[in-house]
Image: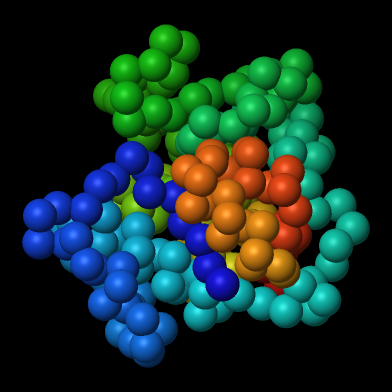
Amino acid sequence: MGIASLLGARHGKDETGMAEELIGMKAAQAAWLLREPSPFAVCLGLAALNAAVTPDPDSLPEENASAETLIAELGRNKAVGIVGDFPFTGALRETAGELHLFELRDVPGSVPRDRWEKVLIGLDVLAVTGTALLTRQMGYFLAQAYNAVSVVLGPSTPMSQSLFRFGADYLCGSVVVDPGPVLEGIRKGLPFRAIKKRGGIRFVRWAAQG
């Protein structure tokens, strides 16, 4: 089972039955929806991709799987960039030397768009949400912050080695180990923070080798 954020996307008039049409489809074919222009189709494609590349959780180290702990350790007294809305941002501000927020929306305290390139080049650590794949921004951030140790995190993050080839150093994602409570939470429209409290999800960390 794979999951991905919808980022508020809703199906269009011609996409009403799209999710049902994926039943029985090969994962590679369903993941091809990532290339579609429709935000809803892209989200379904990422969920399909995540289902296809889900690793055996027992093959990955469970100890210190917390993305928050990793980023705090890497970023202590250093320049850290955050792409995404994370509950630990406030705590990270207390330990990082500098903390820079990158938001597509106009958010107070975030880096102005015309300064993104200059600030990204100077980062020591970059934490970027897996949903940047949905907004087509992942490649941009990993490429621009080429001096930084980059961490891709969140439940939408594909646990795929291909991200290492494009500049990621760590993947901090989640693996569904018990679909029952996860599906129930999704059907109820719960946010991920509430879904994970129901159980059925294991957080994993994967580091690039070499």
Residue 50, can we see it? yes
| Residue 81 rendering spot, x and y as whole percentages | 55, 32
Residue at the far top: name it: 108
Horizontal side of residue 70 vs 29, given as left or right = right
Horizontal side of residue 150 vs 45, given as left or right = right
Residue at the far right: name it: 63
| Residue 8 rendering spot, x and y as whole percentages | 33, 40
Q: Residue at x 76, y 73 (%)?
A: 57
| Residue 105 rendering spot, x and y as whole percentages | 32, 24
Residue at the far left: name it: 14
Residue 128, can we see it? no
Would you identify the image quadrant in which residue 102 lies? top left
| Residue 5 rendering spot, x and y as whole percentages | 44, 50
Would you identify the image quadrant in which residue 73 lies? top right
Q: Nearer the viewer, residue 107 or 79?
A: 107
Would you identify the image quadrant in which residue 127 lies? top right
Q: Residue at x 56, y 72 (%)?
A: 1
Q: Nearer the viewer, residue 108 or 126?
A: 108
Please say which color scheme the image uses. rainbow
Q: Residue at x 74, y 21 (%)?
A: 91
Q: Residue at x 72, y 69 (%)?
A: 177
> Height in image: 118 above or below 142?
above
Horizontal side of residue 188 vs 135, given as left or right = right
Which quadrant holds the C terminus?
A: bottom right
What is the number of callouts on the image? 0
> Height in image: 204 above or below 25?
above
> Height in image: 188 above or below 176?
above
